[in-house]
Image (spheres, coloured by chain):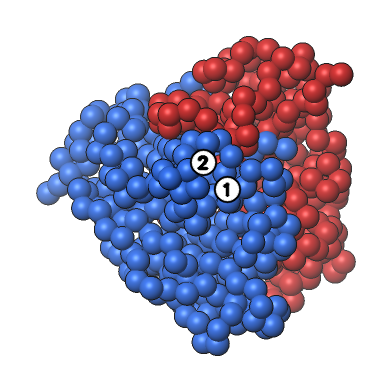
Chain colours: A blue, B red
Amino acid sequence: MEPPCELELQVAVAKVSKYAVSESGDTVETIERPHGGLSIVLVDGQRSGKSAKAISNIVARKAVSLLADGVRDGAAARAAHDYLRTQRSGQVSATLDIVSVDLATRTIVVSRNSHCPVIVVTGSDLRLLDEPSEAIGIHARTRPVIAELPIVLDTHLVVFTDGLLTAGERYGQPFDLPAFVRDHLQAGQHVPRPKGVPDASCAAGVWRPAGHATEGSGDPATSAQTLPAQYAGALADALLARAVELDQGRPGDDISVVVLSVVSRQAPDAVRRLAVRFPI
Amino acid sequence: MEPPCELELQVAVAKVSKYAVSESGDTVETIERPHGGLSIVLVDGQRSGKSAKAISNIVARKAVSLLADGVRDGAAARAAHDYLRTQRSGQVSATLDIVSVDLATRTIVVSRNSHCPVIVVTGSDLRLLDEPSEAIGIHARTRPVIAELPIVLDTHLVVFTDGLLTAGERYGQPFDLPAFVRDHLQAGQHVPRPKGVPDASCAAGVWRPAGHATEGSGDPATSAQTLPAQYAGALADALLARAVELDQGRPGDDISVVVLSVVSRQAPDAVRRLAVRFPI
């Protein structure tokens, strides 16, 4: 019998604020799910700068805190809406996306309260989650549009705020996001194989992690965190870089991109890793 | 006048669970601080496996939720203690470390409720934050031991659970953590310079980011998330790898390592990045 296919989850977030505004009005948080897996919460507060940040912060905080308590995603999104609407008397809106990797159900759950679509690529198939969906904070009884996808090899989700969607529009150069994502993934050069991992598909069952946990000398040059094997990171960075380029180096809005990838296992160990970096 | 030195904050977390136990009893969460910066919460629940995870999860959740509300670190640690002690009638303990990069005060705040020291390296100086400190959950009025450090170039903090501290002890090969950290950082080879960034110290004021945000073609081979410029990640990975090696490939306890580095700016853009990866 073939060994089961070993999968790796990669999540990458890349964010930049509107040109000449020091603070992004977008907030992205990740949180562990109490029954296994993690959730990513992406909020774009109305307008930009400090006031937008205050909005996105309270919405993200409410959603994250409920998700950490084990509240289901749809209920967390509804509660975040009710909370914002109560706090701000229905005068202020925000878009809210929650993406959860639920290891209890082995699914990816996408809850959208945003006009921005979510791009889903599975193998060579690309589709949009773009059912009409409204921002939170304004109308009574707003609820999220939810999609549930199986966790399968070679799945990529791209979730973003509208700064990405509208990049380049001011200059008559709209960003064809699905085409860019397709090209990037099809190029197949977006991620060099890590050293020591044969270039074989997981389906062939050829490559298995070598041991329980990190092995070797601790030589940082080959450490997994420094390997270039970040499918999700490469795509998030490429999307953000292209958006900024289309905005001629001066983003017209806060831009946040979240990429979630289910790929064959890249790191030859069972280590869970998280990395954050930003200028201070 | 010299331009101000441009700094980058890097945080890396690497975690592995005890050998033959599927779930780590440690929980690590990061959260944005409402007044700027971020906090990292590291909790080691008593014992290992599912019961330890349940403990570390409720403690981390409580601390993260308070920090997100803007509660000061010392009060969040006290509240997490009171909460655990109330929930579990003083019968269950956990260690709790909170490390905050507070951009309002421009300091790094370390709150320890753990017998594990925190290693602090500033330039060529290495010291331990190792004042006696007790775990939360058991005794009345437990409080954290707090240290506040300035945010300065070339600062590295290493925070960990006792699986790292005791690695190798079963085999008569204790892990000399300070020596390892010093050697790793002094080797200076732990991080190749990223392409396009001259090999000049920040103090010389030579290198400045080239533009407001990501520039260039979006060529993923040079994207910042795939650059090997992860000081913090390389050190976290090296520490974890060495610990697992000393435990002969079978960690005797859950091991979690958090490294926080303040380095000269590596990425030539103003992008904030987060990456998570783990086997599923």
* Residue B162 at least partly seen: no
Q: Height in image: B72 above or below A224?
A: below
Residue appearing at x 77%, y 25% in the figure: B5
Whole-percent x, y for residue A7 in the image = 31, 48
Whole-percent x, y for residue B18 in the image = 49, 48
* Chain letter of the residue beneath label 1 in the structure image: A
Q: Which mark is residue A252?
A: 1
Whole-percent x, y for residue A9 in the image = 39, 49
Q: Height in image: A274 above or below B119?
A: below
* Residue A168 as seen in the image, left or right of residue B75: left
Residue appearing at x 50%, y 57% in the figure: A161
Q: Which mark is residue B176?
A: none
* Residue B4 as seen in the image, left or right of residue A114: right
Whole-percent x, y for residue B154 in the image = 74, 25
* Residue A164 as seen in the image, left or right of residue A151: right
Residue appearing at x 52%, y 52% in the figure: A163
What secondary structure is found at the residue carrying circle 1? loop
Q: Nearer the viewer, residue A8 or A76?
A: A76
Three-letter amino acid code at disc 2?
Asp
* Residue B140 at least partly seen: yes
Three-letter amino acid code at disc 1?
Gly
Residue appearing at x 34%, y 33% in the figure: A190
Residue at the extreme bottom: A140
What residue would you read off at disc 2? A247
What secondary structure is found at the residue carrying circle 2? loop
* Chain letter of the residue beneath label 2 in the structure image: A
Quick one: label 1 or label 2, which is nearer the N terminus? 2
